Image: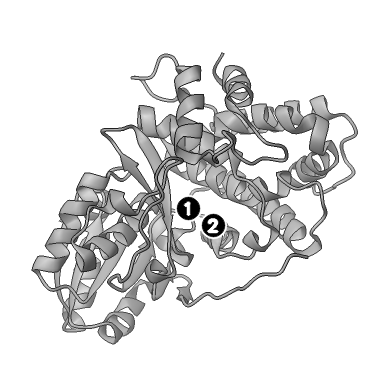
């Protein structure tokens, strides 16, 4: 096992009816909060008014910034950061899915620095600045997907340059995360499925990027993917099943709290998808779903054994179920289709420019030698091959 340092400073409150816990958490961070929300669903579903009520009862002054996009834009983050500074916010409260939580981390940096958040984002040609300070954050996720509630990562889109990349800083790790599975009851089916795919990809990226066996981390990957598979199937049949929602929520958090990161390895599925959604502004989970099978096909000559074990356990709870790689991939693709994960990217995206996406992947996420890390290095030509299989 590799050397590593593990530190999770987030206090997590998990469970049904835990939403009200905000009344105890917020006063520990100050007296004034800026609430960050997306484009209206938490208002429509009554979550925002409930949060405002809880804050009023805790004597916390609050204001709301509405309008975070599904792929949060740097310009929107800058605007919200200035508002946080203007109202002298002591804390930020993210109420929403992964995009809202990611945006809130950027807002926390802008509020303290008054800088353009994009100056902290790294590309191949330009390393981003390191944040020096940030407002404290409370995350209240309403979707099981990104796991942003338990780490210091945030993914931000520059809509003008069509670049999508990440910031990583311990300064934006949430102080508190309140994970109440009931808040995911109103998630539309497509978002629910896309979130499940995102959790699966978080679990398998470094598993597939290593031929070496990492006992604890690999078993966690197998357990998470099997749990997500069972949970999403249950919820598509019975959306009211709160136990399945709880399992999905906790899978999302465990996959991204750093336990699997001790395995290290590349994240090619995510990096390629970031280029897709950076250019075409599509659902992150949907883009990932289209890339899974072609990436596993690319990996076949290098990591077939672990791939077969992964798919066998995920679909059948048996790592020895598959001997034939093509059969395993076919069954996984059929399963993704069965849950509605392989939908068309969007009504506005009729065709993917394979060359442009591959080049954007390297432009944003490649190293100085012109490749991204997978189980083997992936150059533009390799990424193009994956994209052609995904979108031909």
Residue 322 placement, left or right of 293: right
Say which quarter of the image contains residue 223: bottom right
- Label 2, secondary structure: give it: helix
Coloration of the structure image: one colour
Residue hosting label 1: 146
User: Where the N terminus falls, by quadrant?
Assistant: bottom right
Q: Residues within 10 Å of mark 1 (few under 14, many from 20)?
A: many
Give 199 or 277, whichever is nearer the viewer. Answer: 277
Q: Are marks 2 and 1 in contact (CB under 8 Å)?
A: yes
* CA gap, disc 2 and disc 1: 6 Å
- Label 1, secondary structure: give it: loop
Residue 45 placement, left or right of 232: left
Name which residue lies at 18% across and 56% down.
80
User: Where the C terminus falls, by quadrant?
Assistant: top right
Name which residue lies at 85% across and 47% down.
319
Residue 197: image location, x then y, percent: 56, 42
Disc nearer the start of the sequence (2/1): 1
């Amino acid at each position: 096992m590799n050397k590593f340092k593990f530190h999770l400073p987030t206090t997590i409150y998990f469970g049904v009816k835990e939403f009200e816990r905000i009344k105890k958490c917020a006063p520990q961070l100050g007296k004034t909060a800026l609430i960050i929300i997306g484009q209206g669903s938490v208002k429509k579903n009554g979550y925002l008014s409930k949060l405002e009520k809880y804050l009023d009862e805790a004597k916390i002054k609050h204001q709301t910034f509405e309008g975070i996009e599904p792929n949060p834009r740097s310009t929107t983050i800058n605007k919200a950061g200035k508002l946080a500074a203007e109202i002298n916010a002591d804390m930020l409260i993210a109420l929403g899915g992964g995009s809202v939580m990611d945006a809130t981390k950027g807002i926390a940096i802008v509020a303290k620095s008054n800088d353009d958040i994009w100056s902290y984002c790294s590309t191949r040609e330009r390393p981003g600045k390191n944040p020096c300070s940030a407002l404290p954050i409370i995350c209240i996720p309403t979707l099981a997907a990104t796991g942003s509630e338990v780490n210091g990562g945030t993914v931000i889109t520059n809509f003008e340059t069509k670049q999508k990349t990440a910031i990583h800083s311990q300064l934006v790790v949430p102080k508190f995360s309140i994970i109440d599975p009931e808040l995911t009851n109103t998630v539309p089916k497509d978002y629910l499925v896309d979130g499940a795919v995102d959790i699966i990809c978080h679990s398998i990226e470094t598993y597939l990027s290593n031929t070496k066996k990492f006992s604890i981390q690999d078993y966690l990957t197998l357990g998470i993917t099997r749990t997500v598979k069972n949970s999403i199937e249950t919820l598509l049949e019975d959306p009211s099943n709160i136990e399945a929602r709880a399992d999905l929520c906790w899978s999302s958090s465990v996959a991204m709290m750093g336990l699997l990161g001790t395995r290290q390895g590349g994240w090619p599925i995510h990096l390629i998808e970031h280029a897709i959604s950076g250019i075409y502004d599509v659902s992150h989970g949907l883009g990932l779903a289209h890339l899974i099978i072609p990436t596993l096909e690319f990996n076949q000559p290098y990591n077939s054994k672990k791939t077969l074990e992964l798919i066998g356990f995920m679909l059948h709870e048996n790592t020895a179920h598959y001997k034939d790689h093509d059969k395993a991939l076919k069954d996984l693709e059929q399963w993704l289709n069965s849950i509605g994960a392989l939908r068309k990217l969007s009504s506005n995206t009729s065709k993917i420019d394979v060359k442009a996406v591959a080049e954007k992947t390297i432009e944003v996420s490649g190293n100085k030698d012109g490749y991204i890390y997978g189980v083997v290095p992936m150059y533009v030509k390799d990424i193009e091959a994956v994209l052609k299989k995904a979108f031909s």
